[in-house]
Amino acid sequence: MSTIRVLVGTKKGAFILTADGKRKSWDVSGPHFAGWELYHLKGSAADPNRLYASQSSGWFGQIIQRSDDGGKTWNPPGTKPEDLMGPDGMPKGRSNEFAYEGEVGTHKFYDGSQHPWEFKRIWHIEPSLTDPDTAYAGAEDAAIFKTTDGGKTWKELSALRAAKGHLWQPGAGGMAVHTIIIDPKNPQRIYIAISAAGAFRTEDGGKSWKPINKGLKSQHELPDPDADVGHCVHRIALHPSRPDVLFMQKHWDIMRSDNAGDQWNEVSGNLPTDFGFPIDVHAHEPETIYVVPITSDSLHYPPDGKLRVYRSKSGGNEWEALTRGLPQKNCYVNVYRDAMAVDQLDPCGVYFGTTGGQVYCSPDGGDNWEPIVRDLPAVLSVEVQTLK
Amino acid sequence: MIRVVLPFHLRNLARVEGEVEVEVAGPITVGAVLDALEAKHPVLRGTIRDHGTLKRRPFIRFFACKEDLSLEPTDTPLPDAVVKGEEPFLVVGAMAGG
C-alpha cells in the first residue's frame, strides 16, 4: 500500500505527517528545527527521500536544510564532515549564501522611491523533476536562485530581475518569488510568480524571462489596471498533463490561461469572494480546481466565520462549497498560498494548513474533511509526497 | 583558548552544548574570534554576520565582561579576561519586544 508523507512548514518548526493510503491514522514527527520559521519544505520527484527545507529567523537569517532519508535526519548542505574541506582547503558552509548577481540594482519601494535589492529569506524551494541535486529557490527580495550541487551553493538566475524589476513593488507581505513551477514536459520552461509584480515565464531555463500578465485587472491596486507588471499574483497551479493551462489565485480574482500565460481570463464565477491565497488542481481531473475564499484584503479570514474550500469541476466559473468536516462557525483562520497540496492516490487527497495550526485532509477529493492535527503553530506551507 | 557562548538556536544549529572554545592565532579581536568560530563551525557562516560584507546581522549583539562590543570596530582587541579564558565572549540574539 502507498504511504503519504505530508511536509508541513510552520512559524515555529517543521512537522512531518505520515499515513498509509487510507489516510485515516497519522503519525506526527516534529517539531524539526524547533523555534525557526519554516517557510517551505519539498521533496524531489526524482528521489523522494531527498527533501529540501527553507529555515529562517529574523535574528540568524537563512538556513537551507537537506534530508537524504525522507526527513529522519537533516544537514545544511555542505556542512557534513566530508563536505567541509574543498580542493582549496577552505571550509564551505555556503548553502545559505544567496548573493544577487552583478549590479544589485533597485526596485520600487513603498514610498515610491527606488530601493536596492536586499536578501531576506527563501519562500519556496522547487526541486527539479529529474535531478535530485538540482533545485530552484524563490527569494525575498524577489529573485530566483538555482543549485546543481544539492544545495551546497546557489546562483541567481538574474535575468528575472531584468524583466522590469525596477517597477516591482513589495506588497504588505513582502516582495518574494513564492511560486515556481517547472513545466513537466519541457524543463526549460518555468513559471514564477511574485507579489506584487506578477507572473513571469522563461522558455530557456532562466536565461531570459517575460511578464505574462495580460488579462489581469487590478483596478483597486494599480493606477493602470492593465499594467504589464505590478499585479499581486498569490499563486499559480497547473495539471502536469496540460502544462499550458494555468490557474491563478490573484489578490482578487481567480484567473485561467489556456496558452501558458499569454492571456488570462477571469473564472471567479459564483464564488462568495474571489480574494484568497492558495489554488490547486486535482491529481487526476485537470478541470477540477480548489480555492479557499477569504473575506477580503482587509479581513484575512473566511466569510461569515465558515471555513469552506470551493471546488470547480469545470475549470472555473461554477464553484461548489465543500464544508463537510470543516468548521462552519466562529472560524477566523487564514490559509497561506503555499499551504495547499494534493496527493496522487485515487481518490485524490487534498490537504491544507491554516494559520490556526490545523492541517486538514480530504481523502476523497474534497467531499469530506478531517483535521490531521489541530494545534500546530501557524502553518506556512503544506506539501505532499505519495510514496509507493 | 577563547570561550564563546552562543544563543540557543545557534548552539542547536552547530550541534554543540554549553560553551564553544576556539583557538585564535594573532591578535584576539571580535573579528578574529568570529573567523575562528566560523572555521570550526561553518554552518554558522551567514547567521552571525553577512556572508559577503561580514557585517554583524542587525539583531545580533556581542558582549564581553559586561560591555556591549556590538558597535565597536571588529579589529577592537577583546578584554584581557576573555583572552585569558577567564570570561566568555557572548554572541547574543537581541531582545525582541512583544
Image (tube, grey):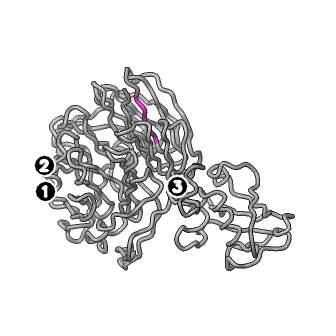
- Tell me which residue sits at (74%, 61%) in the image: B22
Report the quarter where the N terminus of chain B lies. bottom right
In which quarter of the view is residue B42 placed?
bottom right
| Whether residue A148 is situated above or below residue A225 in the rendered picture | above
- If you read the primary sequence from the N terminus, does the residue marked by circle 3 or circle 1 appear first? 3
Binning the other alpha carbons within 10 Å of mark 1 as few (below 14), some (14 to 19) or many (20 upward) gives: some
- In the foreground, B52 or A291: B52
Amino acid residing under circle 2: Asp
Instruction: Give how far across and how far down residue A148 sits, in percent.
Output: 39, 54
Residue A258: assigned label: 2
Amino acid residing under circle 1: Gln
Regarding mark 3 in the picture, which secondary structure is present there? strand
Residue A6 painted magenta: yes
Residue carrying label 3: A63
Give yes or no for contact between labels 3 and 1 (Cβ–Cβ under 8 Å): no
- If you read the primary sequence from the N terminus, does the residue marked by circle 1 or circle 2 appear first? 2
Give yes or no for contact between labels 1 and 2 (Cβ–Cβ under 8 Å): yes
Residue carrying label 1: A263
Write down the region rendered in magenta. A4-8
Binning the other alpha carbons within 10 Å of mark 2 as few (below 14), some (14 to 19) or many (20 upward) gives: some
What secondary structure predominates along the stretch shown in magenta? Answer: strand
Give yes or no for contact between labels 2 and 3 (Cβ–Cβ under 8 Å): no
Regarding mark 1 in the picture, which secondary structure is present there? loop
Q: Chain of mark 2?
A: A
- In the foreground, A200 or A91: A91
Amino acid residing under circle 3: Ile
Q: How many marks?
A: 3
Residue B38 painted magenta: no
Instruction: Give how far across and how far down residue A57 sits, in percent.
Output: 55, 57
